[in-house]
Image (cartoon, coloured by chain):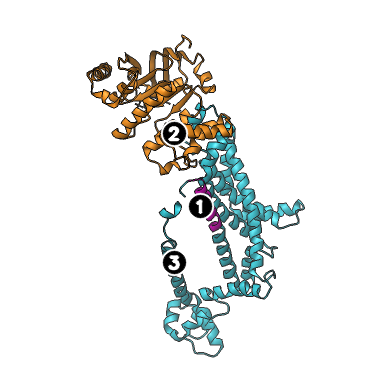
Amino acid sequence: MGCARGIPMTKAALPILTVLAAIVGIWYLAVAPMNIRVALDTVERTGAVVTPEGSVERRAVSVWRLMAQNREHVSAGYALDRPRLPTPAQVGGELWKTTGEMAAKGRAWSKRSLIYHSWITLRSTLWGFVLGTSIGIIGAIAIVYSRVADLSIMPWAIISQTIPIVALAPMIIVVASQLGVESRGVPKAIISAYLCFFPVLVGMVKGLRSPEASQLDLLKTYDASGLQTFLKLRLPGSVPYLFTSLKVGIAAALVGTIVGELPTGAISGLGARILIGDQFGTPLAIWAALFAAAILAGLLVTVLDVTQRLTLGRMGMRA
Amino acid sequence: MSQQPKISAQGLNLTFQTNDGPVHALKDVDLNIEEGEFVSFIGPSGCGKTTFLRCIAGLETPTAGDLSVNGMTADEARRSRAYGYVFQHAGLYPWRTIGGNIRLPLEIMGYSKADQSERVAKTLEMVDLAGFEKKYPWQLSGGMQQRASIARALAFDADILLMDEPFGALDEIVRDHLNEQLLQLWARTKKTIAFVTHSIPEAVYLSTKIVVMSPRPGRITDIIESPLPAERPLDLRDTPEFLEVAHRVRDGLRAGHSYD
Ligand SMILES: Nc1ncnc2c1ncn2[C@@H]1O[C@H](COP(=O)(O)OP(=O)(O)OP(=O)(O)O)[C@@H](O)[C@H]1O
Ligand SMILES: [Mg+2]
């Protein structure tokens, strides 16, 4: 029944593809000025003539002047080994090399494969998501049913989100290892849950409070118990709100996991790949890891989106 | 049958404490509703019709006076599920089918599964919605939704029906049709009905007793026992008897207005 009202797939995809094309276009244009200095340094080393000569002299000249004076070398910026800004094609190539190509060779679970690192990140994200969602839902129920909880939990939940997670993450990891938790996964899941619970809490409080006074009065005329009111009205009424906040929550959980992988010592996970790429000056690795994270986020949100449509459809509500 | 009225209010008062000071929603309301009566409440906005119905339903607590429903306090009557309440807005749950909505009170009151299905089918039939059991509320027109909400109030064994402007949002033709159906239903089920409306013809057409109210403070200004026969075809509304009753109601409403 939803199909009749929905926009056809091709029509829905058009604006997204337009924006995507614009981004890729701007990206390609940006590669030239971003990489011109590195490009000139590289071609100069191979004996080409560059104006002005010498990397140090060029530092005083703007990138636009450099591009104008060395037109024939601008293209070199699109084929560097260690570019400031890799081209989309280079990032795509690197992504393919570390995922599909390795999988084809049967090395999907090698430490150099992004499939392996994505799986590590995904696992922590899902644990954090489950933990954070549970905390969020239980907290919301407490807040809706108890005035004391409303007054005590909500302010702390808000304060918790004002503390920068980058400051908190190393502390959680240190505390976890002090407590003898060997696995790196546990503190990562905690950090992930820490970011994830909040949108779920806020969304569920709103959802559980969404029934109108008249709907609650109706149940009162049936002398319904508190549990019946919860199961038959508040809970189903909160489902649309729940899914909306789950989508925000899973993205937050992924960010939390990646942040948990950044502090030194981590060797696996997409966050660790980003950090290692930074330390070893391999920008392509950073970009590939970044895109792997974005693709992962997109997949997770899509899965929830489809689940939402199916669930609301089955509940007879127009999604 | 007991001699005691089905619903009895003596010296009922209700004052809401609001930020703008107290609002006297009901002042010294005396009213008896006998078993099997069809009583309409009519009066300008804010005269306390909804408030009075909510008091009977135990959803509001009077600040003074006595109120008995089925020989109990209003709250006890609510707990014994003595009445079905039809709100102004159908208020069907969007995630339940029409059948599921009618099943809601039955589930809560613990009727057996077989009994539930039987009652759902029976009440859908009563409100002329057979065949719509599996539809969702958004697939129905406003009038059909309102009928479904009436079916929901009829599904369980309550012999009082409280209806707050159930047809207020519907067009004249649908309204006429539903009025006719409601009368048939009342004749068949012998329920005691308290019915709020803004429409004089509707009140006169349906009721055995018409209660005229006026605002600030909310009070009863006239109680009219209808002389109309029990059998009421729609064209009864063009007869002199009907117009005379309607006239008296209008006078009552006017008198209430000139008061303030
Ligand atoms: N919960 C409440 N708190 C404060 N004041 C209220 C409350 N409910 C009703 N009132 C006031 O009581 C008075 C009577 O309201 P009520 O809803 O009973 O009127 P009504 O006759 O049903 O009007 P209408 O025809 O517009 O539905 C009004 O002045 C209203 O503002
Ligand atoms: Mg009202």
Q: Please name the color used to draw chain A.
A: cyan
Mark 2, residue position: B125
Which is more foreground, mark 2 or mark 1?
A: 2
Q: Please name the color used to draw chain B.
A: orange
A303 is within the stretch colored magenta: yes
In the rendered image, residues at marks 2 and 1 fall on the same chain: no
For mark 1, name the chain.
Answer: A
For mark 2, name the chain.
Answer: B
| Type of the residue with mark 1 | Arg
Q: Earlier in the sequence, mark 1 or mark 3?
A: 3
| Type of the residue with mark 2 | Glu
Q: Residue at x 59, y 57 (%)?
A: A254
Taking depth in this image into account, of A156 and A6 the one nearest to the observer is A6
Q: Which residues are magenta?
A: A301-316
Which is more foreground, mark 3 or mark 2?
A: 2
Q: Give the residue furthest to the top.
A: B3
Q: Residue at x 52, y 37 (%)?
A: A233
Mark 3, residue position: A17
Q: Secondary structure at mark 3?
A: helix
Residue B199 falls left or right of residue A187 = left
Q: Position of residue A36 (x, y in %)?
A: 49, 79
Mark number, residue A309: 1
Question: Badge 3: how crowded within 10 Å, few (<14), some, or many (20+)?
Answer: few
For the residues labelled 1 and 3, say whether their Cβ atoms are less than 8 Å apart: no
Tell me the CA gap for discs 1 and 3.
22 Å
